[in-house]
Image (tube, helix red, strand yellow):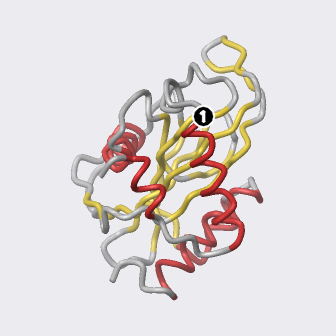
Amino acid sequence: MDYKKAIAAFTPGSVQEAADQQTMLFFIENNPGDVLVRANKIAHITSSAMIFNETMDKLLMVYHNIYQSWSWTGGHADGDTDLLYVAMKEAREETGLKNIKACSDKIVSLDVLPVFGHLKNNEIISAHLHLSVAYILQASEAESICIKPDENSGVRWIPIGELSDYVSEPHVQVVYDKILKKVFQQSFLG
């Protein structure tokens, strides 16, 4: 499905998600030429994933070098309109996993997330917004994992009940909690 249609078809789970969805659609409509690429220095689309183990009681998280926190996998669309593909590609690149499946092709979460100014690969990156589209993926704990040194310094299966002990970004923990609630209480996975 076209990324714009997928974002428009998303059913918000809260007033905040509805507001973020409208902001994203407005920005897409007014920036059709560069919303999918980092060249847009104000905001651009990213695609992330929460990766569950087979028993759905652990999440595969990476220790993000820039944010200095355990986080989900994900990255920039870099011009790709298939955001589920982007989420899966980033998950493979950042964890070393080979076998990942999508639990659904539906978006689980839409969020407008702030990115503070930082240094990456000796380049100054100005503060901007990530128009975050998130999915639910699943992989086996038995599969071998490894870091991606230019992006993370750890990859680990974390029990869901311990997640807040690892995440040092409160504004992102809110997103994780929202997604976990959807997955377990609202039967997102059907």
Q: Could you tell me which residue is drawn at 46 percent across and 71 percent down?
A: 58
Q: Could you tell me which residue is drawn at 53 percent across and 39 percent down?
A: 45
For residue 107, above or below residue 43: below
Per the image, the residue denoted by label 1 is 30
Q: Residues within 10 Å of mark 1 (few under 14, many from 20)?
A: few
For residue 127, above or below residue 158: above
Residue 106 percent across, percent down from the top left:
37, 64
The answer to which quarter of the image holds residue 28 is top right
Residue 145 appears in the picture as rendered: no
Q: Could you tell me which residue is drawn at 49 percent across and 24 percent down?
A: 33
Q: Nearer the viewer, residue 76 or 69?
A: 76
Q: Is residue 11 left or right of residue 117?
A: left
> Hey, what amino acid is under mark 1?
Asn
Question: Which structural element holds mark 1?
Answer: helix
Q: Nearer the viewer, residue 53 or 185?
A: 185
Determine the residue located farthest toward the bottom in the rendered image.
185
Residue 26 percent across, percent down from the top left:
62, 45
Q: Nearer the viewer, residue 61 or 7?
A: 7
The answer to which quarter of the image holds residue 38 is top right
Residue 178 appears in the picture as rendered: yes
The answer to which quarter of the image holds residue 64 is top right
For residue 175, above or below residue 116: below
Q: Could you tell me which residue is drawn at 23 percent across and 46 percent down?
A: 98
Residue 118 percent across, percent down from the top left:
74, 25
Q: Nearer the viewer, residue 188 or 167?
A: 188
The quarter of the rendered structure image containing the C terminus is bottom left
Residue 66 percent across, percent down from the top left:
67, 33
